[in-house]
Image (spheres, rainbow, N blue to C red):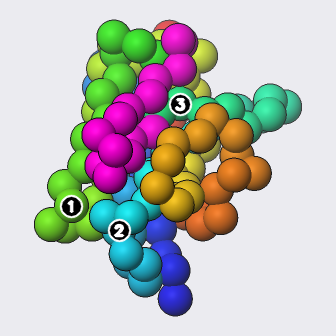
Amino acid sequence: EVQLVESGGGLVQAGGSLRLSCAASGFTFDDYAIGWFRQAPGKEREGVSCISSSVGSTYYADSVKGRFTISSDNAKNTVYLQMNSLKPEDTAVYYCAAMYYYCSVTPSDFGFWGQGTQVTVSS
């Protein structure tokens, strides 16, 4: 069974940092791109970042460039999202998701999703 499990969310003050983890199992990790999405109350789900180890590419939304860093430990089948200089507008449920080979910013392109982890940034 394909599983994606997010962890690392929590409550942090503005300007602080969190590192999210996405642990994957049940598929050939090296053949998939892993994306991070977030959804705040009343907002649509938006792409935050994505990594494709297969093609050596990464993506960052403009709103997080320079603050967030995505990385992959393929030996552990785990993708991380290091979030620095957090802002209240980063508050959302963060999801990781997987799709074959290439990154996308479109949620419907991703076939596998984790359960989400809450990130709350206080002002």
Name the disc covering residue 48, or none: 3
Mark pair 1, 3: CA separation: 20 Å
Calculate the distance from the C-alpha at mark 1 to the C-alpha at mark 2: 7 Å
Residue sitting at 30 percent across and 49 percent down?
53
Q: What segment carries the magenta color?
A: 50-63
Tell me the mark number nearer the camera, choosing from 1 and 3: 1
The one of 83 and 78 positioned closer to us in this rendering: 78
The residue positioned farthest toward the left in the image shown: 75
Mark 2, mark 3: which one is toward the viewer?
2
Neighbours of disc 1 within 10 Å: few (<14), some (14-19), many (20+): few
Q: Residue at x 37, y 75 (%)?
A: 28
The residue beneath circle 2 is: 29
Work out whether residue 15 or residue 54 is closer to the camera in this orientation and state it: 54
Question: How many residues crowd mark 2 within 10 Å: few (<14), some (14–19), many (20+)?
Answer: many
Residue 35 in the image: above or below residue 13: below
Q: Which amino acid type is marked by label 3?
A: Val
Looking at the image, is 91 positioned above or below residue 21?
A: above
Residue at 80% across, 30% down: 43
- Residue 23 location in percent, x, y? 35, 65
* x then y, percent, for residue 50: 45, 39
Residue 74, label in figure: 1
Per the image, label 2 sits on a secondary structure element best described as helix
Residues tagged 2 and 3 counted as in contact (Cβ below 8 A):
no
